[in-house]
Image (cartoon, helix red, strand yellow):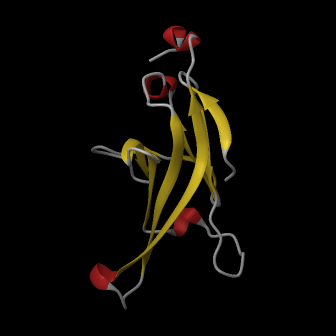
Amino acid sequence: MNTTIKYQGDDIPITVELTDSAGTPINITNLAELYVYVINHKQNSILAQFSKAGGGAFQSLKVVTAFKYRADVLSGTTKNAPIGMYDVDINVVQTDADYQSNQKNTIGLKCVFDLYKSVSKIVSSG
């Protein structure tokens, strides 16, 4: 994931691909769960949240391949979002009997986009 420039009112697809410490791709489909939060860096507030299962406050991640999923932050969400840097905070949940509740949690954080002001956001859907 690289930092990109986006504008209020943009539909922002965020690709999620994971690798282990050796750089080997991780099969996301085989994970117990995957949580993805899109967070305003300055305000530390959640813009959108996703999971494999979806439900409740979480939107469902879209399956692209077993190794690649996508979180779509839609224009209806971004058009009123504060400008500034946004991070993606990911919690990878793996089944492992050696950990509490038989789940090993691994957290990762990366800056993925910088949201700029837009005048045309008024005509964005959502």
Left or right, 36 with respect to 63, comes to left
Residue at the (48%, 22%) spot, across then down? 79
Q: Is residue 42 above or below residue 75?
A: below
Q: Which residue extends farthest front?
A: 42
Percent x, y of residue 86: 52, 44
Relative depth, front residue between 121 and 74: 121
**Picture coordinates of residue 95, whole percent (x, y):** 42, 78
Q: Residue at x 37, y 91 (%)?
A: 98
| Rendered location of residue 48, percent (x, y) | 41, 41
Tally of marks: 0
Question: Quadrant location of the C terminus?
Answer: top left
101 or 109: nearer the viewer: 109
In-image side of 19 versus 78 (left or right): right
Residue 119's quadrant in the figure?
top right
Residue 38, compared with residue 104, is above or below; it is above
Percent from the top left, x then y, of residue 63?
A: 58, 49
Q: Residue sitting at 57 percent across and 57 percent down?
A: 110
- Between 42 and 74, the residue placed more toward the observer is 42
Horizontal side, residue 58 vs residue 111: left or right: left
**Image height of 1 relative to 123, above or below:** below
